[in-house]
Image (cartoon, rainbow, N blue to C red):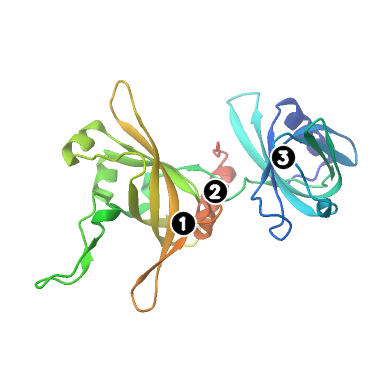
Amino acid sequence: MITSPDKLQACFQAAQDQRSKLIIVMPQEATSMDSLEASLEDFDENHLYLEISTLENYSNSWHDLEIICYFRLTQKKGPQKEMFFNFGARIVELAKKEKIVKMVLQRPQKLDIGQRRSSMRIEMDQNLMVNFCIWEEHRFIRPRTKDTKTGLYSPRINLDYIQEGSFSVVDLSAGGMKVRATSRLIKELELDWNRGLVLVIWMNLDDPEKAKSQDFWIKGRIRYSMEDFFSKDVDMGVEFTHYGQISPDKKMKWQAVRDHNIEPLGNWTYRRYMENYRKGVATS
């Protein structure tokens, strides 16, 4: 937490100089919008003056609302490093000038460290993968037959491939992940994973802070696929669409992901971010 007036001044000045994007999270009861993007145009001892160019209109009921803002700064001296901050503030004035909404906030007296959990994307430490499997959705549940019970097909990807380095989770957030498959693995498994394919993912992740691991059952859709020109390795972006929980009767209950945020996973990534921040290695 930052409370020093001089450090607060320096952070707001840097946010203005770097044209940092401010993510404004409104109270859920006030609007259906998940968030707004703004820029810090000016500030003084009492107020922050924001511009929101992407907002067409606003409600007069927003006056006096308590909102949360998130922003990041890039360290200019020494090794490049990104720092994330957030603060709570009250809206004291709203106006629209030349198609741009002007918002005035009461200047906060403190800044907290950390970014919005739903958008926090961490570089994944493969050593935290206790177990990991991926199925293609259409080859997930094996139907019951005369001779066999209902069960799961063998996964297309498992922890062995991560441990040998042919498959990796590059980064992870509460709303998605980026994975990388080597060209050798793609040929070996004949992976034909294109945009739109739905995957079922099981991750058992170590949580050092709680001294135990945590299970995550997730459905995700491939949003993009990029092949490296030289290595032919492929990076794929997966957006999480459903979060699964096993009911007492041992059945999987799927819930749609809202606002790109699986809260338990967001809490897990936040704890990893703060661990890295305390070690001085948090960069994203």
Instruction: Say what secondary structure mark 1 lies in.
Output: loop
Q: Is residue 17 above or below residue 151?
A: above
Mark 2 in CB contact with mark 1 (< 8 angstroms): yes
Q: Which residue is mark 3?
A: 55
Question: In terms of secondary structure, where does tag 3 sit?
Answer: loop
Quote the CA–CA distance across marks 3 and 1: 42 Å
Q: Residue 62 at what x, y percent from top left?
A: 81, 52
Residue type, mark 2 in image: Glu
Q: Residues within 10 Å of mark 2 (few under 14, many from 20)?
A: some
Label for residue 275?
2
Q: Quadrant of residue 30?
A: bottom right
Horizontal and vertical percent position of residue 25? 69, 49
In the image as oriented, which residue stretches furthest toward the right? 45
Residue at image point 20% right, 56% down: 154
**Left or right: residue 179 compared with residue 146:** right
Q: Nearer the viewer, mark 3 or mark 2?
A: 3
In this view, the residue in front, 264 or 10, is 264
Which sits earlier in the primary sequence, circle 2 or circle 1?
1
Viewer-side residue, 56 vs 211: 56
Give the amino acid type for the residue marked by disc 1 in the picture.
Answer: Pro
Does residue 129 show up? yes
